[in-house]
Image (spheres, grey):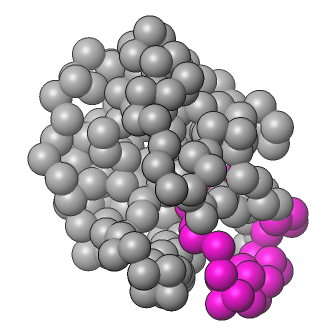
Amino acid sequence: MTFKVQDYYFKKAKKENYLARSVYKLEEIDKKFKILKKDNLVLDLGYYPGSWTQYTSKRVGVRGHVVAVDIQDINKSLSNLLNIQVFQKDVFEIRDIKDLNLATKVDVLLSDMAPNTTGIKSVDQARSLDLVVKIFEIMPTFLKKGGNTVVKIFEGPDAQTFLKSQKHLFQKMEYLRPKSTRSVSKEFFVIGIGLKA
C-alpha cells in the first residue's frame, strides 16, 4: 500500500510554514481536549523536525515556554521562536529538570516519538511500546500534578494492556487517531488529563 507524500496535509503544512504535516495531529488533539493553555510550560520530547514545537510556541504565547528535546541535531529553523529552548539530548538519560534549565516541573508533556520502524508489525509495536513505557517511567520527573500529556503509540494488544494499567495516574485518559494520520499508519495518541499526585 502506498500513499502520496505530497498529500493535502503536506501541502497545508508547507503553505502555513510548519515544518511537518504532523502539526495537524496535535492541533486536532488540542482543540478536542484543551491540552495547551496560555502561559504553559511545555516539554516536547522527540520534537524533530519541530512542527509540534512551532504550534505549541504559538499556543502558550510570549509568557509561556517550550523546551524541545531530541537526539538529532538541533533544527536551526526553530531559532526564530523566542519562547523556546532546544536541546540535543537523549531524553532517557536526563535525570533532573535542572538538566533542561527548568526550575519547576512542566504543565504539559508532549511526545510524538516513534521507534525506527522495520515494517514487521510485531517488532514495530514492541519497539513503540518500549518507548512509551520509558516515557511513563520518566513522566513524574517532569510533569507536575494536574498536568497533561500527549503520547504517540502504535496499535497492539500489549499497548492497550499497558495503557489500562496507567489509567489511574490521570483524572481522565482518552485515545485519538487524528484525521490527518495516514491510512497506512498504526499510530494513535494517548491523552492523559490531570496527573494525580
Q: Is residue 84 magenta?
A: no
Q: Nearer the viewer, residue 96 or 55?
A: 55
Residue at 41%, 22% in the rendered image: 18
Residue 147 in picture, x, y percent from top left: 68, 55
Q: Is residue 165 magenta?
A: yes
63 sits left or right of 176 in the view = left
Indicate the quadrant where residue 144 lies. bottom right
Q: Residue furthest top?
A: 15
Residue 46 in picture, x, y percent from top left: 36, 55
Indicate the quadrant where residue 71 lies. bottom left
Q: Nearer the viewer, residue 100 or 187?
A: 187
Residue at 81%, 42% in the rendered image: 33
168 sits left or right of 42 in the view = right
Residue 36 in picture, x, y percent from top left: 66, 36
Residue 13 in picture, x, y percent from top left: 46, 21
Q: Nearer the viewer, residue 89 or 15?
A: 15
Relative to 10, does residue 165 appear above or below in the rendering?
Answer: below
Q: How many marks do you count on the picture? A: 0
Which quadrant would the C terminus be assigned to in this image?
Answer: bottom right
Q: Residue furthest left?
A: 73
Residue at 82%, 37% in the rendered image: 32
Relative to 124, does residue 106 appear above or below in the rendering?
Answer: above
Residue at 66%, 58% in the rendered image: 189
Is residue 10 something one can see in this rendering?
yes
Q: Nearer the viewer, residue 148 or 8?
A: 8
| Magenta residue span | 147-173
